Image (cartoon, rainbow, N blue to C red):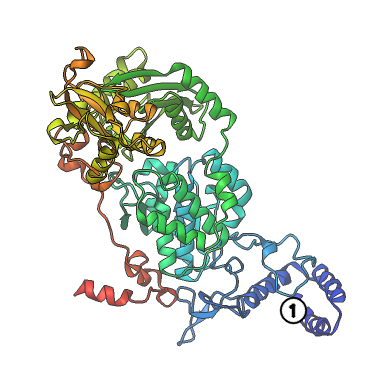
Amino acid sequence: PGWSIFPRMIATDIARTRAPPGAVARSAAGHHRRATAPLRSIIAVHRRAAVINRSFNGRVFCQASTSGRDDVEGADGSSSSSRRRSRIVPRVHARRIEAMSGSHDEDELHLEGEDDDAPGPVNSSRSIMGSADPGAPLGVVLTHVSADFDTLSSAVGLAKLRNARLGANCTFVVLPRGASPGVSHYLALHKNKFPIKEKRVVEAGSLAWAAVVDAQRRDRIGDCDKWLDAAKEVVVLDHHLLATSDIDATELIVEDVGATATIVAEMLENENVPITEEDATLLALGIHTDTGSLTFEATTPRDADALAYCLRMGASQKVLAEYVNPSLTAEQREVIARGMTDVKKTTVEGITVSRVHVECEEYSPGMATCAKEVLDLTDSDVLFMAVSYVHGKKNPYRHVSVIGRAKPVKTVDLGAVLKAHLNGGGHPKAASAAFRMDQEIVSSATLETLRVRGDNPVEGILDELVRRVCAEQVPPERKARDVMRRSRHVVAARPDMTMAEVGEFLDVHDHRACPVISGEGILVGVVSVTEVDVATIKGQLDRPVSGYMKLRSAVTPNTPVSECERILVEQGEGCIPVVANYDEPRRQWRMEGLVTRATILKTHEYYRRNRLRSRKGGGLLAERDEGDKAAPKVTVNPEVFFDSEMLGLAENTKTVPGADDAAADAGA
């Protein structure tokens, strides 16, 4: 019955072009009230096609459709939905194109020039992104459980990339189990901007393609691991090089970058896939949070370039400022408070390794943030934090999550420790693992014994992890004698030199300070350019250096480097003499060496040109077992990443210019 209204619709449209704007709005409102439900769907399809064909600057690939039909008639007259024709059309703002957009708001899809106040279809049976395009190969991107911004942004970007390549809205994001508090708050406001679906509405049997981002193990995606068996193709995308994968993937992509979002941002940029400001902001959040705003040790120049790309694409600085460092929830504050009272510290070779166990009534997200806060508040160098809770109703068991965090201690590799003993993984300074108290810990016989026989099994397991780190990874504490410049290589002033001569002496040797040593080899003081400047202002450059030199402090050869650094920072000294006979009277001190600011900087290895040669030894510096190799790095090839022949949509796949030549070279 709806078809009989089309002549009236045409007449109404003609009248609209001749009527004032107010009358057009009223006419549109009346038209929507009179249209039947089937007719609304037809109008919505034509409206979307009209939006796509609007003329704007730029060009993108999108699904060509003017009739709303998904079947394309072949040369033989048969109808086929597996192969679709794509064409290049003028680009509309990215969030208005269904196949390219992450926006799910129906109210954002309206014709230009149409009155914003005109009512749209009421009780529409199909939302703009509510279902996949019929006939398109269904795909899903899975985040890891307790999703953070890196895995969420990577999933959204990868879904957008596949949709753009296929020219169809057929790839969605699923969060298997929960998200961190910050991500949950973000999604509460932005979820409709991205192609996210609830787990319960996805038909696993219809999946043609599945991807896992920011994780490589099946237990990291909860009960969605069964979907990987149903999908015809499985892609794993991650940035943890040392992690091991138990997923039988069609393609494994692992890149040495600080965030998985960096890899996805590079893909989107290389293929010129249009993204919205919301997309760019989410990708920037993923890079910020996983690289510590480009401050973590694993950060690479590629992360900075990807972040710059997000900013160029319109990432919102207001959103970044709000969510990069979010406020703590009440549950997180409680966990931190309890952790502060129960923390146990062990200090070895100047390194403080702490552990704490917090029991919760139920699962609480965002515990990684709590571990970082406890690490800083307790002034620890390394922290193992266990959070346990009882899970399940019919067959309850205690689930334990172990989170490791460390400051930049060179040889500490928490990812290696948790991987070897609890089958976990992560980065050297940020790692995690999980186990159940009712299941055997097969990766470590020692921890399994503690689980079964220990009085406090969780605390016992943490103590064993602390012992391992202290015994295998904490390096011997460096002393002043290990880093000092030997006295025979130190330039020193004489007590009888004038301040003018000292100033020239320091300038020639490009030093800011030097010791003053008598002819008998006795250390009498230290003079710096500051004293020379004071003498210049007072007009006393002809005075002897003995009137300006000072000797505020000195150290022994066994003084820890950390103590030498404290003296340099707190007392503002430019150099500290190392005295061999420190216990004798000061007038008899003989300098054995000198510790300077440059010496301290070298011990920290802040800069590549100053990095000292690593010592041979155990822990991180020792050679790894053959079975502990890094995951392979797979080059992303557009012809391989999405098998066009398998999908039957080769004509819809957009390739980067030059990719064919590169593939030909590789084949040759």
Q: Residue at x 37, y 14 (%)?
A: 456
Residue 398, position in %: x, y? Answer: 43, 24
Q: Is residue 163 left or right of 476 when viewed as pictured?
A: right
Q: Nearer the viewer, residue 74 or 451?
A: 451
Q: On the image, which quarter does residue 552 sit in?
A: top left
Q: Callout 1: 10 Å neighbours few (<14), some, many (20+)? A: few
Count numbered badges in the picture: 1
Residue 315, position in %: x, y? Answer: 54, 57
Q: Residue at x 28, y 30 (%)?
A: 545
Q: Nearer the viewer, residue 516 or 540?
A: 540
Q: Nearer the viewer, residue 619 or 457?
A: 619
- Residue 631 seen by the camera: yes
Q: Is residue 221 left or right of 469 when viewed as pictured?
A: right
Up-down: is 22 above or below 556? below
Up-down: is 314 above or below 319? below
Q: Quadrant of the C terminus?
A: bottom left
Q: On the image, which quarter does residue 232 sit in?
A: bottom left
Up-down: is 261 above or below 217? below
Q: Secondary structure beneath disc 1? A: helix
Residue on which the image places disc 1 = 3
Residue 19, position in %: x, y? Answer: 86, 81
Q: Residue at x 59, y 57 (%)?
A: 193
Residue type at mark 1?
Trp
